[in-house]
Image: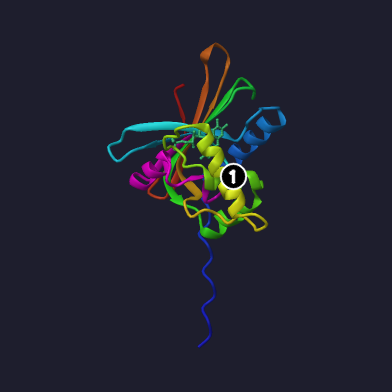
């Protein structure tokens, strides 16, 4: 019996393709325009009771699968995402045009082991050591304790490649909503919202 041909991946919804292209274009424009931290985004998560918290993280990858950031899975955000795997991301490009905001909401999933390993391997060695040494979000009694932990892991991994810590990896936000807010004079801003409902994307304007 001959092997079945591999199934074609489902065609991407053209509105989703448009939203991602718009995001990429704005990010590129913010970057070339001199935004000091164009990939910085506010990441909002909530615990199992729905109590929110937010912090800044860096966008490390974006493609049709979603928006990726890396962190310590034992951190507060990591624990919240384990209990409630949904997140919102917010970019504010203050120096772009009349200011532009991009908002992404969706379910969250861990990236693959291969992706996390590849990204971790690309980081500077000091950042790799830091990922082992930092008990992110836990109370630190004194700066010296952290410095001692850094020294400990520098010794442990002396003259070998630093492996990725088991608690350090990436999360991918799979978009259900992508919205662009374009600032305009006299507060007559424009909002374009793309949303996925029952697998289909729609696009509409929203009052600012
Ligand atoms: C510009 C900037 C970029 C940051 N990037 C990251 C990041 O990519 N990953 C991360 O875990 N923390 C990053 N942080 C630190 C987080 O904001 C936060 O302090 C840390 O992740 C602990 O958050 P939590 O206790 O809510 O889990 C960044 C902070 C700033 C100001």
Q: Which residue is mark 1?
A: 151
Q: Secondary structure at mark 1?
A: helix
Q: Is residue 189 above or below residue 88?
A: above
Residue 138 forms part of the magenta stretch:
no
> Residue 26 versus residue 138: which sits nearer the camera?
138
Does label 1 point to a residue whose CB lies under 8 Å from ligand 1?
Answer: no
Tally the numbered discs. 1
Residue 160 visible in the picture: yes
Q: Residue at x 52, y 16 (%)?
A: 188
User: Quadrant of the rendered structure where residue 75 is?
Assistant: top left
For image coordinates 29% across by 41% down, the residue present is 48
Q: Say few, some or many: other residues with alpha carbon within 10 Å of mark 1 (under 14 / 14 to 19 / 20 or more).
A: few
Residue at the far left: name it: 49
Where does the image place residue 200, in percent across and percent down from the top left?
A: 43, 48
Whether residue 58 is visible to the viewer of this picture, yes or no, is: no
Depth order, front residue of 158/87: 158
Q: Is residue 154 above or below residue 3?
A: above
Percent x, y for residue 171? Answer: 48, 48
Which of the pair 67/46 is nearer the observer?
46
Please report the bounds of the magenta region as a residue range. Answer: 63-90
Which residue is nearer to you in this view: 53 or 131? Answer: 131
Colour approach in the figure: rainbow
**Spot occupied by residue 93 in the image (x, y as percentages of width and height):** 59, 27
Examine the structure image and report whether residue 64 is included in the region drawn in magenta.
yes
Task: Give the residue at x 55% y 54%.
Answer: 164
Horizontal side, residue 105 vs residue 133: left or right: left
Specify the quadrant of the image occupied by residue 158: bottom right
Looking at this view, name the residue that lies furthest to the bottom: 1
- Please provide percent x and percent y for residue 28: 67, 36
Q: Is residue 83 left or right of residue 19?
A: left
């Amino acid at each position: 019996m001959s092997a079945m041909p591999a199934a074609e991946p489902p065609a991407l919804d053209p509105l989703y393709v448009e939203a991602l292209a718009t995001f990429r274009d704005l990010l590129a424009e913010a970057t070339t325009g001199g935004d000091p931290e164009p990939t910085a985004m506010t990441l909002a998560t909530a615990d199992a009771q729905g109590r929110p918290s937010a912090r800044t993280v860096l966008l490390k990858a974006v493609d049709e699968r979603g928006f990726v950031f890396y962190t310590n899975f034992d951190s507060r955000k990591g624990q919240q995402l384990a209990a409630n795997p949904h997140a919102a991301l917010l970019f504010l490009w203050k120096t772009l045009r009349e200011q532009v905001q991009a908002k992404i909401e969706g379910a969250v999933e861990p990236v693959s082991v291969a992706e996390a390993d590849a990204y971790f391997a690309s980081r500077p060695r000091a950042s790799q050591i830091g990922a082992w040494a930092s008990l992110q979000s836990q109370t630190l009694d004194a700066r010296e304790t952290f410095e001692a932990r850094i020294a400990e892991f520098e010794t442990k991994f002396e003259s070998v490649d630093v492996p990725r810590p088991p608690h350090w990896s990436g999360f991918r936000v799979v978009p259900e909503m992508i919205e662009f807010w374009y600032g305009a004079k006299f507060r007559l801003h424009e909002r374009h919202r793309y949303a996925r409902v029952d697998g289909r994307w729609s696009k509409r304007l929203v009052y600012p």
